[in-house]
Image (cartoon, helix red, strand yellow):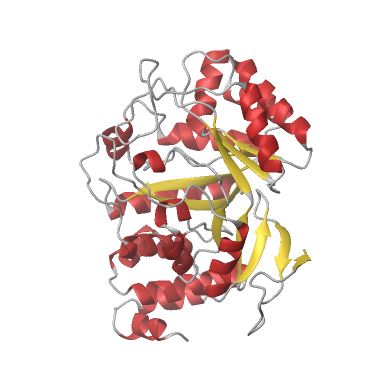
Amino acid sequence: MRDGMNFFVQRNGLRDLHEKVVAGGRIDESEALRLFESKDLNALGALADLVNQRKNGRRASYIINRYINYSNYCILSCQFCSFARKRRDADGFQLSLEEIVQKAREALALGITELHIVGGLHPSLPFSYYTDMLRALGALDPRLQLKCFTAIEILHLAWQAKKTVPETLAELKSAGLVSLTGGGAEIFRPEVRSAIARGKESAAEYLDVHRQWHRLGGRSTCTMLFGHVESLADRVDHLRQLRELQDETRGFVGFVPLPYQPENNNIPVTTSPTGFDSLRTLAVSRIYLDNFDHLTAYWVGMGLKLAQVALSYGADDLHGTILEEHIFHMAGATSPQGQTEAALVKAIREAGRSPVQRNTFYEPVKVWREAVAGATDPVAEPLTA
């Protein structure tokens, strides 16, 4: 047992929660708040690591993927957003289908298995732009997995095309969409949502888009944007609603907590979440979301070094190679635009975990050999999963 676990039991008055989790019990919202309020980060990490290793052993994953933002023109003006632009703005952009296909073709040559595609709520692009994009990308390689669009984008497309949400999702699925992205969840509490993203879809609308997608047999990820104006109780409420939908549909493949980036927006917050807060949030999320198999430490928002540490605090995934990221970097993230596969494998190994390349659904693509002491090859040879 790690020393932190002993502290957890002996000094923090949380022995009951330790025993409950060890026995496989489900903690409730008041208990999750008690965990958030604990100052013993080592103890939280030890308990979260226990939960993670029950589910995933010592494996930690990454994906070889590429981000594409097709446009940053957006009809909304969310207070927290540093990405969106209006037509009058000089740094607004819109990619043609040919440009998107070319980016994808170049990324395929690097071995990607997934394209992650989102954009602003464009005021005038027709529905056919999105279906044609999916079909054109799918034609490049039938093995390429297209993870595209946030819940608010789906609502926007349905409104523009005068279709229901299920009709919109079904047509996108037919065109080649394999997964929805989890972006746009922010914080579900209405008062917080109004303060940071006035005019955006409600929590109920976000959850229902994912519910309808899951009913079609689709799967998706989900997120939480933390470290701005929300309270710890707001975070617990957000996690509760995700856990309840997962109980209903079992359609979420992973949860991705996103640290808020404070630059170039209208939220009165001047600093990103601390390392303590990021690790605490990951740990409590891992313990509370007992019906989720996977939790991602998003290196773009955390930095790779802290994300590496997070592999001992409940996370089992570092996300991907990405290649080109705009949304977090326009908000002030100082992490690199992308990571190499070798860097992700090295980070996982240094954390004492076994690297696994995964696909969009967190399924293994290849499992790497264990590192050998004194070996000159830092990545060795992969074993096919």
Q: Residue at x 58, y 20 (%)?
A: 164
Residue 262, above or below 58: above
- 54 left or right of 49 in image: right
Q: Residue at x 39, y 72 (%)?
A: 44
x and y percentages locating residue 321 in the rendered image: 58, 51
x and y percentages locating residue 202 in the rendered image: 40, 32
x and y percentages locating residue 194 in the rendered image: 29, 33
* Placement of the C terminus among the 4 image quadrants: bottom right
- 349 left or right of 193 in image: right
Asked if residue 55 shows in the view, the reply is yes
Q: Which of 271 and 381 is in front in this view?
A: 381
Residue 120, above or below 301: above
Asked if residue 298 shows in the view, the reply is no
Q: Which residue is drawn at 36% across and 60% down?
A: 278
Q: Quadrant of residue 12?
A: bottom left
* Extreme-front residue of the structure: 376
Q: Which residue is drawn at 65% across and 55% down?
A: 362
Q: In which quarter of the image is residue 209?
A: top right
Image mark count: 0
x and y percentages locating residue 188 in the rendered image: 37, 41
Q: Nearer the viewer, residue 247 or 287?
A: 287
Q: Nearer the viewer, residue 21 or 186?
A: 186
Residue 372, above or below 229: below
- 6 left or right of 152 in image: left
